[in-house]
Amino acid sequence: MQIIFDQDKCTGIGLCESFAAEVFEIGDDGALIIHGEAVTEERRGALMQAVDGCPTNALRLVES
Ligand code: SF4
């Protein structure tokens, strides 16, 4: 699976970072940085929470 990110929808609030800080990071400029777009099995649960928790639907998981 892979993370798809729509920057136009992202408001930079950072809820995704609270679910999976090793993958999502709000940079100093307020823009979201994604560290590794491939979804490993061990990260899958946290990433699904991040996707579900994003208030603007800026994140998706898709089969790669
Ligand atoms: S939770 Fe959604 S809107 Fe907030 S920083 Fe993450 S991707 Fe952007």
Image (tube, rainbow, N blue to C red):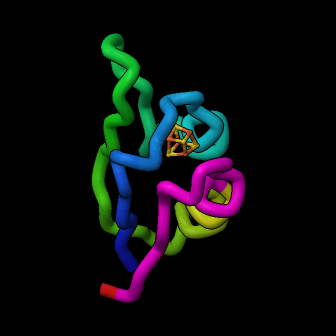
Q: Quadrant of the C terminus?
A: bottom left
Where residue 48 sits: x, y (%)? 62, 66
Image point 36% across, 65% down: which residue? 4
What is the magenta range? 50-63
Asked which quadrant contains residue 47, the reply is bottom right
Is 57 one of the magenta-colored residues?
Answer: yes
**Residue in front for this viewpoint, 31 or 44:** 31
Q: Position of residue 61 (x, y in %)?
A: 47, 73
The picture places residue 14, in percent across and down from the top left corner, at 57, 31
Q: Seen in the image, is 42 located left or right of residue 22?
A: right
Q: Is residue 26 above or below residue 19?
A: above
Q: Position of residue 20 (x, y in %)?
A: 57, 44
| Image: 19 above or below 4 | above
Left or right of 54: which side holds 64? left
Q: Nearer the viewer, residue 7 or 50?
A: 7
- Give the vertical position of 11 relative to 64 (above or below): above
Q: State the residue lying farthest toward the front.
A: 8
